[in-house]
Amino acid sequence: MPSKRFKAAVIGGTGYGGAELIRRLLMHPDVELVRVTSIESIGERLAHVHPTLEGRTGLRFEALSPADAARGMDVVLLGLPHRVSAQMMGELFATQVRVVDLSGDFRLRDPSAYERYYGALHPRPADLQKGTFVYGLPELSRDDIRAARHVASPGCFATTIELALLPLARAGLLSGPVEVVAITGSSGSGSAPSAATHHPVRASNLRTYKPLMHQHVPEIVEALSRAGARDLVLRFVPVSAPLSRGIFATCFAHVDAATPEAALARIAADAYAGEPFVRVPDNRLPEVAAVKGTNYAEVGLVAGDSEGGRRVVACFAATDNLIKGGAGQAIQSMNLMLGLDERLTLEDPGGWP
């Protein structure tokens, strides 16, 4: 088999996000997955942990330092928990390798926001303040990602909510308080079982968690403010739902009543014209089943009546939390960083239903 153009390693490959990174890289025509590291399952074949990989690769999980994992690589993708990625970054910086980090450790610019929402002092606050990492939402920062050596891939809720509201922000219509309720599947909690993800409880239940204090709030505010939002206050309530995959976000924004309804009706379609992975259905509103198992997002909005000089706009978005909200988006950024077509390995449409 001819040698592929680029070589990649995954650090932290036993979780659900790691599984999706590995799957996409194994299919990639231009990037060869060379090694996968973990602190668990050392020496085991990847398929022992991720059954869908049976017969696809002979790679085994390795216990390697970050520097050893990065040796000879063009890019390293980190599927690690928050706070763990930051501890490894010094070693990776020294190797000069390109990095795509799926954790929340480098998404923010404000170290105090990290401390408040992640519950710990950031170990490398200067890297946040000087923007060592580019925020990896291609629909917002595509040119910056192309030029970047370090990308912080957005969170799953953040991706979904930002895509719902980005058209209003770019049009200069997003300001003041925005209320959001978003439901998520259990895979967003990771592969380690817990009381909240235990099937008998999750399968027939709806429950909120971290209301108004979810860690994705500050990255959403920062991203939408860079896109043009003004004085944004985000009130976000996440809801745990009986799904394995998927996020559905409902966002209530308030725009000037003089904004024409016709303009609002076209704003999402115009904002995402030409975007390869954001769809604006013309005969229905977004739904999870239409994007599950894919890197696609669906976006839509409904404008309400004018009242008191303001008009409420309900903005909706749906994503697969592990793909467009996680590993797929990281691969999309990796493709851009390597000068490749960003769509590579990501255009499969999924199944129905």
Image (cartoon, grey):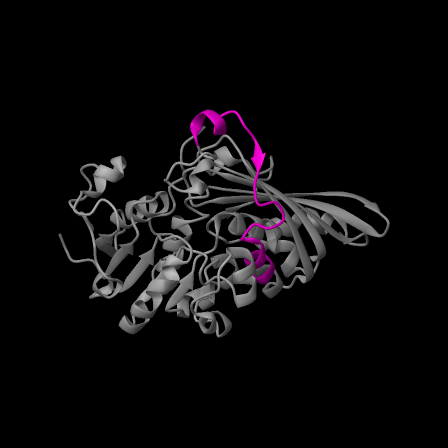
122 in relation to 239, above or below: below
Whether residue 53 can be seen here: no
Residue 207 is left or right of residue 313, and the answer is left
**Viewer-side residue, 176 vs 256:** 176
Per the rendered image, the range of residues in magenta is: 198-222
Whether residue 10 can be seen here: yes
**Viewer-side residue, 85 vs 260:** 85
Q: Indicate the position of residue 343 as horizontal and vertical percent values.
A: 38, 52
Q: Residue at x 56, y 50 (%)?
A: 214
Q: Residue at x 65, y 53 (%)?
A: 234
Q: Indicate the position of residue 78 as horizontal and vertical percent values.
A: 34, 56
Residue 111 is left or right of residue 178, and the answer is left
Q: Quadrant of the C terminus?
A: top left
Residue 130 is left or right of residue 304, and the answer is left
Is 16 magenta? The answer is: no
**Viewer-side residue, 247 vs 261:** 247
Q: Indicate the position of residue 135 as horizontal and vertical percent values.
A: 48, 62
Q: Indicate the position of residue 62 as horizontal and vertical percent values.
A: 19, 52
